[in-house]
Image: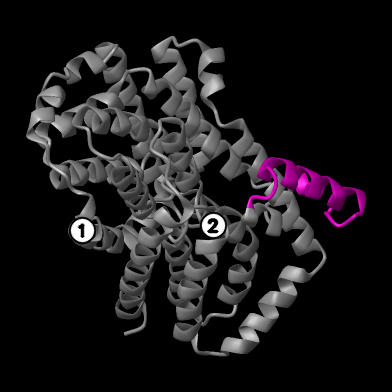
Amino acid sequence: MALIATEKANKVRVVLVAAGAMAVLGLVPGARVFFSEHEGIDWNVIFLLLGMMIIVGVVKQTGVFDYLAIWAAKRSKGEPYRLMVMLMVITAIASPFLDNVTTIMLVAPVTVVVCNRLRIPAQPYLIAEVLASNIGGAATLIGDPPNIIIGSRAGLTFNDFLAHMAPVVVVIFAVFVLFTRVLFRGSFRYEPEHVAAVTALQERRAITDPRLLARCMAVLACVVAGFGLHAVLHVEPSIVAMVGAGVMLLVSRADVSEILHEVEWPTLVFFMGLFVMVAGLVHTGVISTVGAWTVAAFGDDYFLAATALLFGSSVLGAFFDNIPYVATMAPVVEGVVATTPDPRTGQALWWAFALGADFGGNGTAVAASANVVAIGIASRTGHSIGFWQFTKYGIVVTVLSTFMAWIYIWLRYFT
């Protein structure tokens, strides 16, 4: 975990070596690592991510994200703060339905193009988009990878996340949008002579295939509806995503090999290796020991437990990639939840855990995958973002959003 957190080595290589070593040493539960829901690879998570990556790969071919970014730039009339708000809103709306990493990969390159046309620095806009993406992605089961892990472990549905996470996310995002006026106040520079360059862009030309876009939107709407009807249909979100991916490939008649090339295979392999590592911790009793210590430490004060989970996850999630952190801590939280007197209190602990981990992802430049992706895109396009350049904004937003989430947890579940 230390190598992953410090990025001293490629994280995929690290988890594969670690998982292999655990298998050789007999620290993982044998064949159960492939078949046990709680002591092995969680295939619901893997196939949900795979399905959504395929869907996004097809949607990407329509040019709809380019269209939205250019549209926002033109509607803002080149006014920097208005442009930032529109880009953040687009990002935040997309992130709950297309995971935040994918959203950043699609929106960030276009943001760089628009900023270059306006002759304004792209770094503040990219940072604001990442922060907005991590906040918006917290609203749903599929918006942020930690949520997928938590939902699978806790048995929480897409509708559960909408009902419990979305309300506070909307409020926090609204406050964040207003706060950016102060947070990035030194970065707004308006140059009227360059606005004409933006108005010259034709957003309709960005849509490469309108008929394909219509079909893709119809399929995507059905997939989102399937997530929402999970409790009624009794079909796992992973199945909905995979069926949707198959239908998307059929209606688009896209080149399958080309679409599969868009899939983030290293991310999927990373998740699988990580699950094997966590299985080793479960099998050897490390997780149960930590869980027992945690239960003893908090006793019957579940609000204190929720507070510790929220702020602890926010702090640790800011300095460690929140995906391995959540994968490691989820079994511990599950053990604590098992001791709660009623399901409502148990769910409150899960929501505190999810909010802390999601908002902690904004804390530093390496706290979430979306952050790393955006910084990589910025570097390749000549708009390098330093670790502390990102972190000085991220820490402030993390503190603000975590404190607001704490008030929400207290008012909704413990008063």
Work out whether residue 199 or residue 12 is closer to the camera in this orientation and state it.
199
Residue 381 occupies quadrant: top left
At 53% from the left and 38% from the top, the residue drawn is 49
What is the three-letter code of the residue carrying label 2?
Answer: Asn
Name above or below for residue 203 compared with residue 281: above
Residue at numbered disc 1: 174
Q: Is residue 30 visible?
A: no
Q: Secondary structure at mark 2?
A: helix
Q: Position of residue 112 (x, y in %)?
A: 32, 32
What is the three-letter code of the residue carrying label 1?
Answer: Ala
Q: Secondary structure at mark 1?
A: helix
Is residue 33 found left or right of 212 in the rendered image? right
Q: Position of residue 387 (x, y in %)?
A: 48, 53
Task: Please state, as top left, top right, bottom left or bottom right, where the C terminus lies in the image.
Answer: bottom left
Residue at numbered disc 2: 322
* Alpha carbon distance from label 2 to label 1: 24 Å
Work out whether residue 297 or residue 388 is closer to the camera in this orientation and state it.
388
Residue 110 occupies quadrant: top left
Q: Indicate which disc, 2 or 1, sits on the residue closer to the N terminus.
A: 1
Q: Which residues are magenta?
A: 7-34
Is residue 284 found left or right of 293 in the rendered image? right
Mark number displayed over residue 61: none
Residue 359 occupies quadrant: bottom left
At 31% from the left and 49% from the top, the residue drawn is 128
At 46% from the left and 45% from the top, the residue drawn is 370
